[in-house]
C-alpha cells in the first residue's frame, strides 16, 4: 500500500502543466490528498452526496489547481482537476449553478468517489459568487465581453481539453469515455457543449437546463413585471393558497392523489375562481385571495409573450411553488414589496441597462418584451443554447440525456419539451442520441414531493454510451408526501407520462408510462 501511495504521490507532484494554443498558464499545483474529508461549505457534502447516490466521502486523490488566461483578454480562469487513487477509466466534467460556472468541492467530490477523474471551471470568475455583479461590467455601460464569453462557452471546451490532458498524464492512459454532469446552469452548459462543441464529451447529462436563456430570464422576472404594472404585491400566502387549490383540482388526473400534478396538459384550473376565498396569512391581515394574486399566478402559468402577444416561452406548472419568482415581503397589511430573484433582475440590470444601480421595479409587463428582445440581440451568441440542430453531436456518436422536474419553480419544464420537439422536428432519429425524461412533482434540480432520479440518471447515461443500452425509464426515489414512506418511481421519456395502474402506491411497478395525447 505504501509503495502504491508513494507512486501516486510522485506521479502527482511530477505532473507538468498542459498547454492549449491561445492560453497561458500562470499557476499550476498538484497535491496528493490522503483520506480527505471536505471542510464546511455553502452546500455541505453530507447533504449533497446522498442525493447522488453515495453514503461516504473519505478518499485519496491528486488535486490539481490551475490558473490560466487568454493573452490580451485581461481574464483569469481557475480550473480544478481531481484524480482519484482508484480510477474507473472515465473522465467527468461537472457544471455550475446560477451565475457560477462551476462548483468545486461539492460536485467534484461525488465524482471521484465514484471513480471518475473530474474537472470543474470557475468560467473566469470566483466560483463562490452567486451574482454576476463583481464581473459583468468593466465599467458603467460596458459589459466585460471576454468574461461573458468565458462564462458562456469557451471555458467549457477548455475544461474538456485541459482535463483530459491532465488525466492522461497522471494515469499514463487517456480516459476511455468522458461525461458531463450538470443541472440548471450546469444543464445549460451541457446543452452548449452538445450544440457548439459536439466532440468534447461522449455523454452529456443536462438536467433542468437553462435553455433559450433570454426568454428564460424574462420568465424569471415576468411575475414581478406584472406586479410592477398592477402596483400591487400580494403576500406569499395568497400564492400558496392558489397553488394548493390548483393541485387539489388536478392531482387525481394521473389516477392517484399524491399532491403531484403529473399531467399538466390536462389541468385547466382557473385561478380567478378562488378570488375572494379565505386564506390564513398569519402575520399579516390579508384574509382572502385577491384578484391581483390571481392575475400574477395566471401570468406565471401562461408564460412570456412578445410585443405581438405571441407566447414565446412556456409558463410554470400549476404545482410549482410560485414563491421562487413572486416572493414578496410584507411589513404590514397592504404594505408588501417584491424580493426579486437575482438571475432575472440582474440580467436586465447588468447586461441590458449595464448599470448596477438600475431600479428593476420600473420594468413593467408592457416593456418586458423590449428588454427580452434587447437581451436576445446582444447576448444570444454568448450564452444562448437554442440551436436545435444536433447533427454534429449525433455524428460524433454523442448521447444526450436530459430530465426536468415538472414542478420546477425556476426553469419551466416546458422549455425542455419545446426544445426537444424542435430537435425532433429536424430529425426523426432523435431518440437514438437525445432523450428527455420528466419528473413529476420535482422542483428545480431537487426537492418537492416527487421522486428524484437516482444518481441524477448518470448510470443510465453510462450504459447508453458504453453498451448501447438506450434507457426506457430512469429509476427514481422519493418520500410519500403524507406518511413519509420511501416510494419508487420510473421516470418516463417525453412525451409519455406516468399513470397509476393499481397496486402499492409506493412501488414503481404500479405505474405505467402512457401517451395521454394518443390514448
Image (cartoon, rainbow, N blue to C red):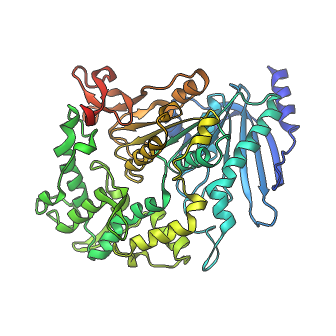
**Is 305 situated left or right of 377 in this image?**
left
Q: Residue at x 53, y 35 (%)?
A: 49
- Which picture quadrant has residue 286? bottom left
Q: Quadrant of the N terminus?
A: top right
- Which picture quadrant has residue 190? top right
User: Residue 418 at what x, y percent from top left?
Assistant: 40, 48
- Which picture quadrant has residue 360? bottom left
Q: Nearer the viewer, residue 428 or 342?
A: 428
Q: Residue at x 85, y 32 (%)?
A: 11
Q: Quadrant of the C terminus?
A: top left
**Does the image show residue 302?**
yes
User: Residue 399 at what x, y percent from top left?
Assistant: 57, 34
**Is 169 situated left or right of 61 in this image?**
right
User: Residue 328 at what x, y percent from top left?
Assistant: 32, 66
**How many marks on residues?**
0
Q: Nearer the viewer, residue 428 or 164?
A: 428
Q: Is residue 456 above or below residue 504?
A: below
Q: Is residue 58 above or below residue 27?
A: above
Q: Nearer the viewer, residue 384 or 262?
A: 384
**Is 366 situated left or right of 239 in this image?**
right
User: Residue 169 at what x, y percent from top left?
Assistant: 83, 34
Q: Is residue 425 above or below residue 291?
A: above
Q: Is residue 184 above or below residue 217?
A: above
Q: Residue at x 44, y 78 (%)?
A: 359
**Does the image show residue 285?**
no
**Is 363 situated left or right of 266 in this image?**
right
Amino acid at each position: 500500500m505504501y509503495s502504491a501511495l508513494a507512486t501516486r504521490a510522485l506521479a502527482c507532484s511530477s505532473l507538468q502543466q498542459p498547454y492549449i494554443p491561445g492560453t497561458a498558464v500562470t499557476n499550476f499545483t498538484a497535491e496528493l490528498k490522503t483520506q480527505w474529508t471536505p471542510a464546511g461549505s455553502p452546500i455541505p457534502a453530507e447533504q449533497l452526496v446522498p442525493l447522488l447516490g453515495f453514503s461516504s466521502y473519505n478518499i485519496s486523490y491528486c488535486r490539481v489547481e490551475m490558473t490560466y488566461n487568454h493573452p490580451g483578454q485581461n481574464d483569469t480562469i481557475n480550473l480544478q482537476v481531481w484524480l482519484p487513487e482508484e480510477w474507473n477509466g472515465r473522465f467527468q466534467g461537472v457544471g455550475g449553478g446560477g451565475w457560477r460556472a462551476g462548483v468545486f468541492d461539492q460536485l467534484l467530490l461525488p465524482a471521484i468517489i465514484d471513480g471518475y477523474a473530474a474537472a470543474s471551471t470557475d468560467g473566469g470568475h470566483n466560483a463562490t459568487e452567486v451574482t454576476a455583479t463583481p464581473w459583468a461590467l468593466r465599467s458603467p455601460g460596458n459589459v466585460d465581453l471576454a468574461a461573458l464569453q468565458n462564462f458562456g462557452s469557451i471555458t467549457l471546451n477548455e475544461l474538456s481539453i485541459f482535463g483530459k490532458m491532465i488525466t492522461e498524464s497522471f494515469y499514463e492512459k487517456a480516459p476511455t469515455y468522458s461525461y458531463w454532469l450538470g443541472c440548471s446552469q450546469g444543464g445549460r452548459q451541457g446543452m452548449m457543449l452538445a450544440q457548439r462543441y459536439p466532440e468534447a464529451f461522449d455523454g452529456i447529462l443536462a438536467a433542468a437546463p437553462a435553455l433559450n436563456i433570454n426568454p428564460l430570464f424574462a420568465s424569471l422576472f415576468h411575475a414581478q413585471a406584472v406586479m410592477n404594472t398592477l402596483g400591487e404585491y400580494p403576500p406569499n400566502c395568497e400564492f400558496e393558497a392558489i397553488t394548493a387549490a390548483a393541485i387539489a383540482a388536478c392531482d387525481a388526473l394521473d389516477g392517484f392523489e399524491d399532491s403531484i400534478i403529473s399531467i399538466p396538459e390536462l389541468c385547466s384550473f382557473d385561478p380567478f375562481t378562488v378570488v375572494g376565498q379565505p386564506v390564513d396569512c398569519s402575520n399579516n391581515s390579508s384574509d382572502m385571495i385577491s384578484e391581483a394574486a390571481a392575475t400574477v399566478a395566471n401570468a406565471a402559468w401562461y408564460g412570456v409573450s412578445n410585443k405581438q402577444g405571441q407566447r414565446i416561452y412556456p409558463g410554470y406548472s400549476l404545482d410549482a411553488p410560485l414563491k421562487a419568482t413572486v416572493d414578496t415581503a410584507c411589513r404590514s397589511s397592504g404594505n408588501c414589496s417584491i424580493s426579486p430573484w437575482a438571475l432575472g433582475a440582474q440580467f436586465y440590470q447588468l447586461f441590458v441597462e449595464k448599470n448596477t444601480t438600475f431600479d428593476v421595479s420600473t420594468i413593467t409587463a408592457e416593456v418586458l418584451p423590449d428588454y427580452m428582445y434587447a437581451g436576445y440581440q446582444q447576448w444570444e451568441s454568448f450564452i444562448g443554447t437554442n440551436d436545435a440542430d444536433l447533427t454534429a453531436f449525433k455524428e460524433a456518436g454523442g448521447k444526450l440525456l436530459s430530465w426536468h422536474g415538472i414542478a420546477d419553480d425556476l426553469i419551466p419544464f416546458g422549455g425542455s419539451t419545446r426544445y426537444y420537439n424542435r430537435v425532433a422536428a429536424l430529425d426523426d432519429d432523435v431518440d437514438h442520441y437525445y432523450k428527455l425524461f420528466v419528473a413529476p412533482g420535482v422542483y428545480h434540480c431537487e426537492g418537492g414531493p416527487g421522486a428524484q432520479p437516482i444518481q441524477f440518471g448518470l448510470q443510465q447515461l453510462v450504459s447508453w454510451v458504453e453498451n448501447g443500452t438506450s434507457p426506457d425509464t430512469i429509476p427514481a426515489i422519493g418520500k410519500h408526501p403524507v406518511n413519509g414512506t420511501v416510494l419508487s418511481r420510473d421516470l418516463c421519456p417525453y412525451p409519455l407520462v406516468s399513470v397509476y395502474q393499481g397496486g402499492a402506491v409506493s412501488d414503481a411497478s404500479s405505474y405505467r408510462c402512457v401517451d395521454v395525447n394518443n390514448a
